[in-house]
Amino acid sequence: MQRWPVLLFLAWACFLFFSGIGLFTSGFLLMRIELTNRSSCSDPLAAPAWVGQGKAPGACWMAQRFPKAVLLIIDALAFEFARFDPAKERPRPYENKLGFLHHLAGSQPRHARLYRFRADPPTTTMQRIKGITTGSLPTFIDVGSNFATYAIKEDNLLSQLVQNGRRVVFMGDDTWDGLFPQKFFRSYFFPSFNVKDLHTVDDGILQHLYGTVDGGDWDLLIAHFLGVDHCGHKHGPDHPEMAKKLTQMNEMLRSLVDHLGNDTLLLVAGDHGMTETGDHGGDSEKEVNAALFVYSKTPLFGAHLPEEPHTIPQVNLVPTLALLLGVPIPYSSLGEVMAELFSGDGETVSAALTQLSAYHINARQVDRFLRSYSLAAQDLSAVQLRRLRELFSAAVEEYERLLARVREGLPASPELEARMGRLLGRFQHYLRAARAVCMESWARFHPLRMVAGCMLIAASCLLCWVASELAVALDFSYRSYLLFPLLWGLAAAALSGLGQLLTREGPDFVLLSSWSAAASQLGFFWHSWSRRPLRAHLASSQPPAASLGLRQRLVFPMGLLAIRCCAMFSDSFVVAEARVVPFLLASLATLLVGRLLWHGRLLAPEVPKPPLGSAASQKESWQLPWLLAALLACLRLSRLFHQCREEIPHCQPSPFLAPLSSLQSTQAKNLFYLLCVASLAGLVYVVRRWLRHCGNLNSSSPLVLFVRWAFPLVAVCIACYWAVTSGMEGTLGKLQELVQVALVGFPWAVYGLASLGLLLVLWKPMTVFVKDSWVSVRPIVTPYQGAPSSQADLLYVIPQIYRRMQESLKDQLERGRRRATVAAYGLGSVYSATLVVVLTLLAFLLLTLHSERMSLSFLLLFLEAFVLLRLHVCITSLTGDAALFVVPWDAVTAWVLAASQFFYATGHQPVFPAIHWNAAFVGFQQGHSSHLVPALLVGANTFAAHILFAVGCPLLLLWPFVCEAPGSRRRKQKKELLEEEEEEEHVMEMRLQESPERFSAALLHLGLKYLFVLGVQLLACVWAAMILRRHLMVWKVFAPKFLFEALGFVVSSICLLLGIFVVMRVDCAVSTWLRQLQAR
Amino acid sequence: MKDSEIKRLLSAHIFCVFSIILTTVVPSLFLENFSVLGTHLTWLCICSICVTIVNIILYIIFKPNPSSKRISFAHKVTRFLKCCVYFFISCILFHGIIVLYGAPLIESVLETFLFAVLLSTFTTLQCLCMLGPNIQAWIRVFSKNGAMSIWDNSLQITTMCSIVGAWLGAFPIPLDWDRPWQIWPISCSLGATFGYVAGLIIAPLWIYWNRKKLTYKSR
């Protein structure tokens, strides 16, 4: 049997997928490291000029300009909405509605000004709020943030204000509550979730706004209106409702300005724009163009009035507002101060000096951030950073020279003013360059990479399909399908590596691996195309009988797979996937049974079935409806364990998800604890029962002993662990230390025992009991001397005498030939027994990581897997095509669907807040020193179902063999070695052993099919994320879904390799054993 | 002979289709506030009853599978009672299957059950009318070469169309369109009804199209 080529081929196919995923991810998921550093007033960033002059009270970095500010965020206030063009005769519903802003800007040009406010993509509200408060460019994943909550951990404007004793009052969108928990002095939150609701949030704000403003006990007032955005989502911008909403906003502004004091700065900002359909999230011109309006009752701007409103990036608001309010600029802010707001009403030189000092502080802060960031992460290019640093130091030197000159007290001259202007330009240039560098690496999709990654995954799917077809045909030449493509890939990797070495200094592994993947795929397709004539010849020589049946069996699984893939493109279906997947699986099973009925295979004994007697098929046909009902029941029961997503309004998460310790009533707790222990015991019992049934529990090999003794021990350990964790905190007062030890000790015992078991599997995987009757002339074993004295002795001896006589009689009947018999019990199920042992061990491990009551779900998982396997066997045998070595598509699809179903049924959802973070602390009460262990534990918890089903995937191939020949269960296989000739009777799984070529081809085939089905789902996810990257829900639904699906794929494929590896290890051991047997 | 059979089939089916259309229109004349979506449960009852009555009348008129031997009255009564029991069992079974497929278990039991009744009228009732309470015959009809007359063929088509319609009707439920017909079980029952009507229309056409190919074994 070719073992390594099969594994290598599958590993190569996995690598192709991985590189595709990597390439797509690098283009789609914008990543950034969050720094936890915070600015403070004592940071030595302020210019020496200020140190020298002595600070004004309350000043920090710069003198406070405004004691109070009102920040009104009107969600999705696009620039077109805020602009007023009196010349327009027939304005659209969204145009010319905010007339008050125009009136202010026109009548008081030194007090008010309108800007274009450019948002950075992704233009979703949460990311924008992060941007407006932290001044950085948030991406989808800000590494370092705590995934369990959305709270902002980075330094931000609000925390600076709070840190410096200001009172921040908030009203409006409750997203802020999640982002800034406990930060507000006072807050009025209103639900933002219902997009169809235009008025709740706005009316709520209006109720409190004026009162709060008049009350005066605040320093920064933030009001976040949602009506405009919701109106856009519901009706689109071009709708009378939008006109009403904007008019309402206009009135609100008009009356708000009346309430404002002289020392208050008013900022009206849109967090993003909207497209013509009212959506946002992407990076199109309409989405990123928001409006910013600045107003104060004291003069703010210089006399110079620009023709066209300036365009300023959104992050600029942060340093500006921070310095105006007299607090430090948040540490990671990348914004540039808005110079006009610092000009004040002084004469030119002093105004320019103030501006320069603001710029100087700003530049030093950005430089400090870039230094810290480049220490923490490597994603900014070193060359660019060096260039930036040069710009920075040159500008600072010039600034200090200039400052020295001003201190000397030389009179203002046009030359000095020009120098100041130039320096201002240099600071601006530096800050903009710094922003551009960061933006390039954080805030931009790479469409080329996304498309290329998508194509790579699609090509890998195609490759899996083609290769699986080739594997069936049994002319799989590893030389031309594996070796040559690998060489192609290596060559491409070497070439592109060389190219990267020549052009840039750092190698890009993602690009490297994707080049080599693409080249090796090309190699594969090239070789399979060039061998086509040969294959056509081979195919024509084979009878084409089976192909029709196979083609017909393709329709249902592929159709359902297509439906599942289409469902990935709808956010509602992704949200409801926990219900969709069981529905599809139930439909698939029903369709398969229905097809058997339609073809008359259920109740028509006259149809001949070569491998089985009609009695057996009769039995199976009666089993079939019951199995189907059991499967449906399992599917329905699995819904008991579902977690909720926030998108589903009236959803109650399953009570089983909470740990037992959260239960109040002791009685219920005890009851549930017993139930959990019972299900655990049930799992152990069922597995042991099955192994005994197959005869794999008789031998005294270490693995079998492990199964017999350590399985209950592991179960006891888990039960004890549950007992300790679910106990009350205070009740065990004196034993507290003991409890702490137990909390660590029991999980470690489980980990240790399970890994011991896995090692045993690798060392001696055979679970076969060999009864060697080589020496047939044996004395009767009797410990008694002399005549039997009692009834008991007689009972012991007489059967032995009888058996002895029987044996000698049999010998005579065999014409006196001496024959040696080796009876091997459990040889027929040797592969699946080992796999089941591995699965059980893994299940124990994963059970420990879940909350107690999830053990019921794991029991259900095993039951459903068993039912699916039985169903698969029944359907295969009733369909009656003899291709036992080919696992049909319907079985593989059902298996993959079951894996996704149990992802949900173990209490998971593809969103970050739903991850079970507790799993990281099972057995590690004190926390971790590295990130690897918790990542592994949480990953194992999240993808438990993927792991179990992928490892168990070879069972689909093995099970039909195990279930064969129901009559001769006791004696699994009797291998007879005769002296002269060898006569072997192969049954059950030994038929696999008998034809190693076909066995390895079948394993390859199965693996490729599994990868194909997984890959197609992944492809649909990737596609959805790419096409719908402008969708409202992309960062809430599609991107997390893609991430979970991709990770699930990686976990599944690795575990698939593991499962196939275990089977091959068993096969290795079996063939060695057989060889030894023959040598005797 | 075959053409006349097809005509009879067609007329029967048209009668059925009209009866279903009438159930959506006529009750609003008698009942206030009646609409298929608003008072869905009432419509479900009316539609089930109406289809049942029409089917029985059609069965009495057309006698699709005439048997030669005379049947005693007592036998007829037991047969009728058996049919009723079968129908009830099928309602329960359908209810169970629908719940297993993901319908809510406890809340809206009545809706689910009425939907099961509707599905039974579209499928089981027809089988009972055409084939009688004879499971073997049912299994025979629902296999590839089991149809023995065009009535059997039409039975196959209408039944499958109804069930497929109900199945497809489940797909709009998760969508966030906030339409009144997305509420359980309206989309499914509407799907089943549309499927049934489609089946009634398709069956004669399909049989007419394939009339050359269709050959029936004699019993």
Image (cartoon, coloured by chain):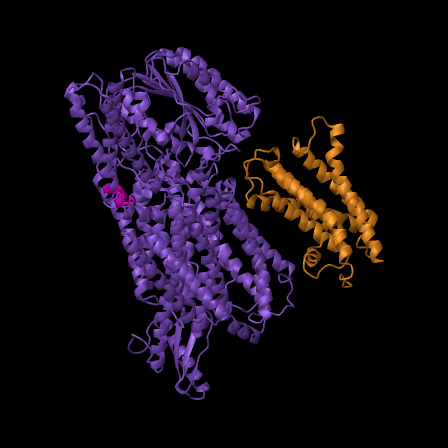
Chain colours: A purple, B orange
- Toward the viewer: A959 or A809? A959
Measuring 65% from the left and 39% from the top, which residue is drawn there?
A: B114
Vertical placement of residue A219 versus A1023, above or below: above
Classify residue A993 as left or right of residue B78: left
Residue A675: x %, y % from top left: 40, 45
Measuring 54% from the left and 75% from the top, which residue is drawn there?
A: A537
The C terminus of chain A: image quadrant: bottom left
Measuring 46% from the left and 49% from the top, which residue is drawn there?
A: A900
Measuring 59% from the left and 54% from the top, which residue is drawn there?
A: A591
The N terminus of chain A: image quadrant: bottom left
Classify residue B38 as left or right of residue A133: right
The residue range painted magenta reads A371-386
Residue A1066: x %, y % from top left: 37, 67
Query: Residue furthest toward the front?
Result: A414
Vertical placement of residue B80 versus A763, above or below: above
In the rendered image, residue A11 lying in the magenta stretch gets the answer: no
In the rendered image, residue A381 lying in the magenta stretch gets the answer: yes
Prevailing secondary structure of the magenta residues = helix
Whether residue A286 can be seen here: yes
Vertical placement of residue A219 versus B145, above or below: above
Residue A858: x %, y % from top left: 41, 49
Classify residue A433 as left or right of residue A910: left
Q: Dividing the picture into quarters, in which one does residue B19 lie?
A: top right
- Toward the viewer: A16 or A842? A16
Residue B135: x %, y % from top left: 68, 55
- Toward the viewer: B73 or A194? A194
